[in-house]
Image: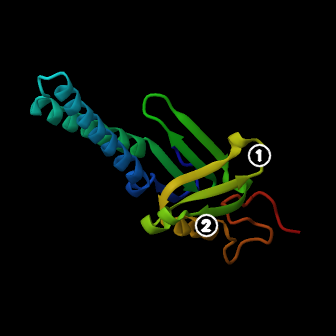
Amino acid sequence: MNLGPGETVVFEGHPSWRAILGFYIKGILIVGVIAALVGLYGETIGDGASTTAIVAVLLIGSALVVLIGFLKRVSTDYMITTRRLHIKHGIISRDVQETKIERVQDVNYSQSLYQRIMQIGDVDFDTAAQDPQGDFVFAGVSNPEEVVDRVHHSTEPKAGQQPGSSGLGDDRTDVQPR
């Protein structure tokens, strides 16, 4: 993403690896079940499943689970600048959501019990858009409270700014105060 003049990055990241830990655990369990079924199938037909087949299922299946989880994580980018909110998903096909930060009305985060234990959470940006497509959620980020604080600190008016200025770098220099 190209930054405009005076625009700075407030937050940039991906979902935490801890956010997809559940995916890894479920995937490895499914691979284990498939390997057990391969072993049972070999015993049922009488020739016995070779250890090589079971090991191959375990190794290939586990490698696929780890690769898919890694790609799922790194193919999602979150960025907050002093002017924009940006979410990008995908490697081959892309889904990009972007809005001006001044359209953000509320910034909240939520954590389930599991997410609190894992120190991750979902940061929800409520925008002026009425449609569900306008929802911006940073899912599974580490330390969601810190992300919310960064947004609040970056959008607060700084000392010496004109009254009514948002602190978002949108101050106009071509207008003289009355």
Q: Residues within 10 Å of mark 2 (few under 14, many from 20)?
A: many
Q: Are marks 2 and 1 in contact (CB under 8 Å)?
A: no
Element under label 1? loop
Depth check, front residue: 110 or 155: 110
Q: Which residue is mark 2?
A: 154
Tell me the kind of residue under disc 2. Answer: Ser
x, y percent for residue 4: 58, 49
Q: Which residue is mark 1?
A: 129
Depth check, front residue: 28 or 128: 28
Tell me the kind of residue under disc 1. Answer: Ala
Outermost residue, right direction?
Answer: 178
Q: Residue at x 66, y 74 (%)?
A: 158
Depth check, front residue: 127 or 110: 110
Element under label 2? helix
Tell me: residue 134, above or below residue 101: above
Tell me: residue 92, above or below residue 114: above
Q: Residue at x 89, y 69 (%)?
A: 178
